[in-house]
Amino acid sequence: MVKSLNITEARNKLTSLPDELAKDHASLTVTRRGKPVLAIMDWEMFEALTETLEIMADPEMLAVFRKGVSDMDKGRVHDWEEVKAGLDL
């Protein structure tokens, strides 16, 4: 759920926002005169979003991702214990 605060409210609550947003990985829209001007989100969500954008922007990485999804759809997967047993550690 995206919460919305005007810029003055956001400024007044800035120190409590990290805990508030981390609870449910929510984002916050900050408005000025009723129009969105900023987005605030917890760091984990930002990192996940940034990583997703990087993958989508890289044709090779996106192709690998799509192949992985296709392999999963077709049941071409291996159990982690099976893979781990095959490793020479």
Image (cartoon, helix red, strand yellow):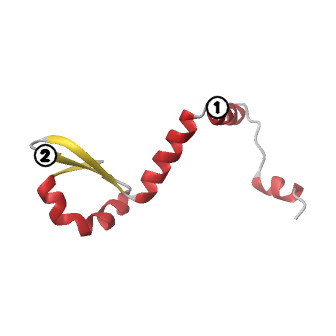
Q: Earlier in the sequence, mark 1 or mark 2?
A: 2
The Cα–Cα distance between marks 1 and 2, rounded to whole angstroms, is: 40 Å
Please provide percent x and percent y for residue 11. 17, 61
Please provide percent x and percent y for residue 6. 14, 51
Please provide percent x and percent y for residue 56. 54, 34
The residue pinned by badge 1 equals 66
Quarter location, residue 13: bottom left
Q: Secondary structure at mark 2?
A: strand
56 relative to 24, above or below? above
Q: Amino acid at mark 2?
A: Arg
Residue at image position (27%, 63%) is 17
Q: Which is more toward the observer, 61 or 45?
A: 61
Q: Amino acid at mark 1?
A: Arg
Foreground tag (1 vs 2) = 2
Please provide percent x and percent y for residue 47. 48, 53
As drawn, is 47 to the left or to the right of 65? Answer: left
The residue pinned by badge 2 equals 32
As drawn, is 12 to the left or to the right of 74? Answer: left
As drawn, is 66 to the left or to the right of 86? Answer: left
Please identify the quadrant where the C terminus is shown: bottom right
Crowd rating for badge 2 (residues with CA inside 10 Å; few <14, some 14–19, many 20+): few
Residue at image position (53%, 46%) is 51
